[in-house]
Image: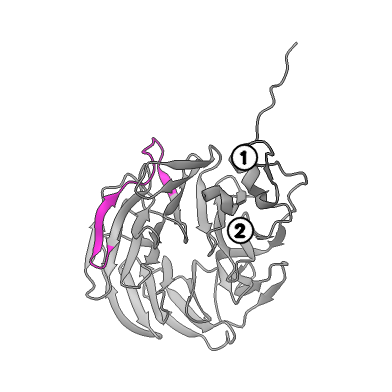
Amino acid sequence: MSYDTPTAPSLFDLLARVWSLPGPVEDMCFNREGSAVAYAGGGLLAVVPVDDPEGPEKRIRVAADSGQQSIMPREKPVRPATEVKGLRGALAPFRDRAFITGSEKGGLVSVTPRGQTVPLSVAFDGAPSALARDPAAPTIAAAAGSRVVVFPETQPDEARNHDAGETITALAFAPQGRHLAVAHPGGVSFYHDGTFVDTVALDGIPESLSYSPDGAFLACGLREPGFALIRLADGSVDSVRDYPTPVRSLVWSTPGQAFATSGAFRPAAWRFTPEGRGEPIVAGRTGLVVVDRVAAAPDRPLIAAGYASGFLCLAQLGSREEMLLRSEGGAVTTLAWNAAGSHLAFGDARGAAALISFPPSLFK
């Protein structure tokens, strides 16, 4: 006679809510007020509330004899996501609570947390290949082909059009707003208040963009292994090409005063100074699988790292210490923290869309 040995729930089981999409998760973001997160993949958008009536902080129990805290398993099933079909293309926050993406019928639409879609009065052909929201103003930039459209959220019909001359691969607004970076095979073009400023050529095709918190540098992940760092003051370029795979995400840690990327066998990180990239920093342990995505915690010197094997962990900047969150699954395709650092959302290549909630006591 054999008996099944009961297994204790993992930390991921205790902290995460997981939903399933019919295809790989291609994009994901929190809305501006942080009340909801949306996942795009498999031809639909899945929207879930951040608030959880049975969140881990509500399941903490304290032992009477030792005072030790533990998190009890969830008693009720996770509430299903709100699914919206007929959408495609990139995804971004829109206004305070909604999201913006493309419609299969053409044009741009906003989607509320309850799944209501509203077509926007913007002349736009095809699905958006890239979207960006100005962090300092209610302004959206959307790209399709070689054209980028910039418009106010409250007045979409007042759009301005720019033609990059080449297929646009990524968009990013500077943290202080007004400055828009447009990536294409020829490099990165910069616009200020809608006026073209300059183009910086790169030795490679940029496919992801990330401004430093002070807006002084722009990091560019390349289609080829490696990344480029543009100093905006003079247009000089610092190229780093000794990577085994392309760099798909680049992040800045204000608490850790560091810059980190994916594309290596652990998060590749450097101390960051006003002069640029400084000394390398240890961040977690070196493994045998490449890091596909990284995300910097906004409130702690921590880097979330998602691997091609589905492994997900938190790595402390300046240390080899790691906190295991998930040991296996589909390759991590999207990864982001909310603004408060209390939730980590990710999606994977097998269609898993997850939201991990961290009780404040976990990091004490």
In terms of image quadrants, where is residue 250?
bottom left
- The image's colouring method is one colour
Of 291 and 27, nearer the camera is: 291
* Residue 316 relative to residue 103: left or right: left
x then y, percent, for residue 56:
66, 49
Mark 2, Cα crowd under 10 Å, few <14 / some 14-19 / many 20+, is: many
x then y, percent, for residue 248:
41, 54
- Seen at 42% across and 71% down, the residue is 172
Of 304 and 46, nearer the camera is: 304
Of 357 and 61, nearer the camera is: 61
x then y, percent, for residue 150:
48, 81
In terms of image quadrants, where is residue 173?
bottom left
The residue under label 2 is which amino acid type?
A: Tyr
Distance between mark 1 and mark 2 Cα atoms: 36 Å
**Callouts 1 and 2 close, C-beta under 8 Å:** no
Indicate the secondary structure of the residue bearing disc 1.
loop
The residue under label 2 is 39
Image quadrant in which the N terminus is located: top right
Indicate the secondary structure of the residue bearing disc 2.
strand
- Seen at 34% across and 60% down, the residue is 257
Question: Would you place residue 179 above or below residue 77 in this image?
Answer: below
The residue under label 1 is which amino acid type?
A: Gln
Region in magenta:
273-292
The residue mark sitting in front, 1 or 2, is 1
Q: Is 289 colored magenta in this rendering? A: yes
Q: Earlier in the sequence, mark 1 or mark 2?
A: 2
Q: Can residue 21 be seen here? A: no
The residue under label 1 is 68
